[in-house]
Amino acid sequence: MYDVCIVGTGAGASGVAYKLVEAGIDVVMIERGGFYQEKDFSKDEIAYCKREIVTPPFKESYHTIEDLEDGKWVKTSTRETESTYFNGNIVGGSSNFMSGYFHRMKPKDFRLLSEFGEIKGANVVDWVVDYKEFEPYFEEVERLVGVSGEVTPYKYHEPRSTKEFPYPRLDEHPISAKIDEACKKLNFVAYKTPRAILSQPKGKRHNCYYSNYCGSYGCSSGAKGSARASLLQPLLHKKNLTIITHAFVKQLAEKNGKVSEAVYVDTKTKKEHRIKAKLFIVACQAVESSRLLLNSKSKKFPNGLANNSNQVGKNLLFSAGGIGHGQFDTTNMNFKELMEEGTFVNRSLCDWYFYDDNGIKKGGIVDFLFEHANPISKAIKQRFDGSKLLWGKELQDRIYHKIAKTKQLNFEVFNDWLPTDNCFVSVDEKYKDAYRMPVANIRIGAHKHDLEVGRFLAKKAEKVLKTMGAKNITSSISSAPPPNLQAGGCRFGNDPKTSVLNKHCQAHEVSNLFVTDGSFMPTGGSVTYTWTIYANSFRVGDYIVANWDKYWG
Amino acid sequence: MKNITRRVFIASSVLAGTGLALLPQGKKTHIKLELFKTLEAVQEVVFPKGLKAPSASEFGATAYLANVSSHSSFLESDLKFLKRGAEELMDTYNNFLTLSSKEQEKKLREFVNSSRLGENWVAFVLYFTIEGLLADPIYGGNKNESGWKWLGHHAGQPRPQKPFGELV
């Protein structure tokens, strides 16, 4: 028997694992995929961007997606759409493949309801902890995971307990100075984007070598702050950490109101195994965490583990917003400077995190970045001119112009995905995976407010591109979710009737069960979730360590 | 994911429109050599030799396709579609392989304009032709890095020691 069994090895799993292992608690982590280390990763676009290599193949598992079509919810299998909602099923999870744009949530993000009031059709609530309680953990992430940057003062900047980031900012592309110039003209603050990428070495991790292939790819130097590189690999020599790979946890068994065993299938041998532990932690990304609880039915929990209030899977969050871009060529910049590879843009707009537009609104942020270097993806998009299929010289000229002559500066808009009754995870006995377990059904209903805020922010970003002289500026704000930015589904709160977890991310109904990925978040902030997930995972880890002897030891 | 870029869902909408998704999944399909000859001819039409661009045969487009389509990561539905389109083309123009390149181009235009399947299939073949142009040569295409050289593209380092993300 282990002390603690953690399902998952991503950011939400590894923060808590780090604390427990350091405290001498015997931990086993169960990972669905394999164990890739720095030497295994390459910048192979086919493997990491074009095939399902680091996610389960569709024949093994999939999701069903419910979209609203003509007033009806229509269910489609991702086996048909071939668009996966799994994200990096290897040790370290999707943090291996993130771009690492790290923004902290703001103090007001922890109390959206109190600050901005109700929004009709949205289930906005305040968090049960505040920024002050989170701040030491945001800071800890900066140190342990490694955040590089330079603090940019602006009117909504969150309080910090340290003056600066522990690692200096990464090298920047010449276009960053152009963004600064444009922002100055517009009276916008060009916010220097912090990144979870080391600009200097840390322990056995090397600093960033500016490979030009960062987001979507595993890091070959260890600079990227993946949960694997930053938290798990440094602990591998410890005898009280075991990582089981190629293991899909299909159910958590319950006995006398507590979790007694994790039941997993070895995905290579297809054999079933059971693991006993005193305490169980679920952190396999929001959708799959809710699915695991919903699939863990027992007499005491007929609707799924910790789900007697029917809250598991509810109020699922993605990140709202969209993308936009503009083209740059030699009319904008010296060709050599424009085509410089590897360095980062690292500029954001945060001036409208809150804004007054006939009443104060919660806004969001915009990150600028170059279109990913991936030549295949860039060239493939050239096949169509509108709806006209091109080939031959016409296509070749377009590909050449796109890749050899121009560069596309993108922006990504992040604003709150409001929690609603129409965005949730459920399971349906009719749709099962290769292990005969119901797959997660994801109903995706976005609140129209999300689109309004997104459009407002996109206009600001477009102004920057216009001032810079970019060509073909466009943006697209959509209610289509980014499948890699998931949170919610197991809200934390004080009331067991309206939340799954208490403020320590411990299930109200099951005292030896915690959920430590993004599932706990009742609202997400207008930032990518990884930093918050890391910070919360550390926070919960500290709580479990402090109370280990009292409750579980 | 796959592209873990945040907005892959939107960015891939063009591909999603090809209608491939509706094909049923089943037993592994095999493509006969004959059909590869058709694919080879079509790839040369859609990606001919340019002033500086390498032609499909020069960069190894068909070798690439043969290679990747036999790997387990190649979706069964994709394989079926690849086969179905090639068969349909040959059924419609059974002398396609003996035609001059100009004639082949003309027939392929007709094929594309005559049905949705035709257009989707050619777009689909182009998709994998472009992969073969710019994927790491470890997969059998991009011969002598000719695709990269044409575009002045610098490969990301490290390059793969093994294909399909196999552990080193």
Image (spheres, coloured by chain):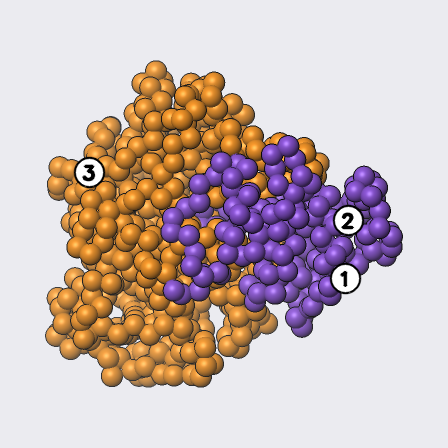
Chain colours: A orange, B purple
Neighbours of disc 3 within 10 Å: few (<14), some (14-19), many (20+): some
Are discs 1 and 3 located on one and the same chain? no
**What type is the residue that disc 3 sits on?**
Pro
**Disc 2 target residue:** B118
Dot placed on the residue nearer the N-terminal end, 1 or 2: 1
Which of the chains bears the disc numbered 2?
B
Q: Which one is closest to the eye, mark 1 or mark 3?
A: 1
Q: Locate the C terminus of chain A by quadrant.
A: bottom left
Residue ID for mark 3: A168
Chain name for mark 1? B
Disc 2 marks which amino acid?
Gly
Residue at x 64% of width, y 60% of height: B66
What residue appears at the point 70 percent right and 48 percent down from the top-left corner? B43
- Which residue position holds label 1? B34
Q: Secondary structure at mark 1?
A: helix
Picture mark count:
3
Q: Amino acid at mark 1?
A: Glu
Quarter of the picture holding the N terminus of chain A? bottom left
What separation in Å lies between label 1 and label 3 (alpha carbons)?
A: 59 Å
Image position of A255 (left or right of A480): left
Between B25 and B84, the residue placed more toward the observer is B84
- Examine the image and state in which quarter residue A42 appears: bottom left
Q: Is residue A213 above or below residue B51?
A: below
Q: Is residue B104 left or right of residue A227?
A: right
Q: Are marks 3 and 2 in contact (CB under 8 Å)?
A: no
Output the chain of dot 3. Answer: A
Task: Kindly report which numbered mark, 1 or 2, lies closer to the viewer in this rendering.
Answer: 1
